[in-house]
Image (tube, rainbow, N blue to C red):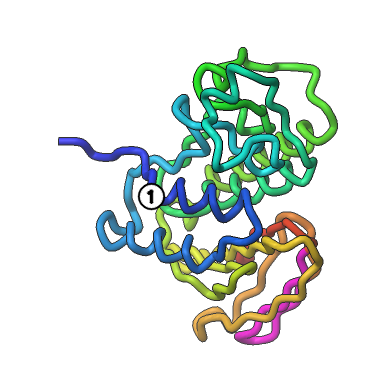
Amino acid sequence: MLNAQFDFNVYDAALATFAQTDVSFKNLNSKLTEGFSYYGWNNLMGIISGNHDKGRFISYAGGSLSFDEDAKYAGWTRKIGVGNPLGYKRLQMFNAFNLTIPGVPTIYQGDEFGQPGGNDPDNRKMMQFEGLNDSEQQTLAVTKKLTALRRSNMALNYGTFEPLLITDNVYAYARTYMGNVVVVVFNNSNSSTKIEMELPARFAELNFSSNFSSDFSKSGEKLYVKLDGFSFDVFTSI
């Protein structure tokens, strides 16, 4: 009997949401919480950034690869790049989501920095250890920071999952484990957004630290966050 498989329901919803601007976070939250009804919070499902049967996330997010084309044929017939550099920001959000929700984060080689490509075999390029451009280096640094948070914070490994705010372009949720709290917030729009959210009453006395340098303040059960377009932050209780 299998203990786990790749969670393609969450992958498909996250790909559609983070690689585009016209897909609501409400759909992603619905698919995620539906999975919890089957697997629970403390599950071993593989939360994937991609695999050998999929076109590269960043090529979809940057527009070099279209959702309505055959990604395998495209990979054979033309060079597929990133397209719009905003694809890197979207990839950073996508990786942040995968590394902060329940399940086992599984980064397909190259998605840690934004390797472009179509479907198999265009998504099987050699590992790139050097020669990264500025956007790739910055994306890799964000991924490293996220993986360090995931390894070191028990709430991100074993915590409950609680949606806090869900709109078309803003998504926030909390992970809690034995008094340790992490709040994750996304802005999937192209403009800076001021976000106000209600926190659970049990968070009223907690203080938080920003891990990605966004402007924020907290007053009792209210959290106020300003996020740039296509950005996120992870707040940890201190």
Splitting the image into 4 quarters, where does residue 199 fall? bottom right
Residue most extreme to the right: 134
* Relative height, residue 195 to residue 24 (above, below): below
Element assignment for label 1:
helix
Splitting the image into 4 quarters, where does residue 141 fall? top right
The C terminus lies in which quarter of the figure? Answer: bottom right
Residue most extreme to the top: 126
Q: Of 79 and 238, which appears nearest the observer?
A: 79
As drawn, is 52 to the left or to the right of 24? Answer: left
Q: Position of residue 158 (x, y in %)?
A: 40, 54
As drawn, is 230 to the left or to the right of 174? Answer: right
Q: Amino acid at mark 1?
A: Asn
Image point (62%, 16%), residue name: 127
Q: State the extent of the magenta-drawn residues as a range.
A: 216-227
Which residue is tagged 1? 9
Splitting the image into 4 quarters, where does residue 126 fall? top right
Image point (68%, 48%), residue name: 90
Label 1 Cα crowd, 10 Å radius (few <14 / some 14-19 / many 20+): some
The N terminus lies in which quarter of the figure? Answer: top left
Residue most extreme to the left: 1
Image point (73%, 47%), residue name: 89
Q: Position of residue 2 (x, y in %)?
A: 20, 36
Q: Position of residue 119 (x, y in %)?
A: 52, 26
Q: Position of residue 120 (x, y in %)?
A: 50, 21
Magenta run includes residue 220: yes
Q: Of 33 and 122, which appears nearest the observer?
A: 122
Q: Of 15 and 183, which appears nearest the observer?
A: 15
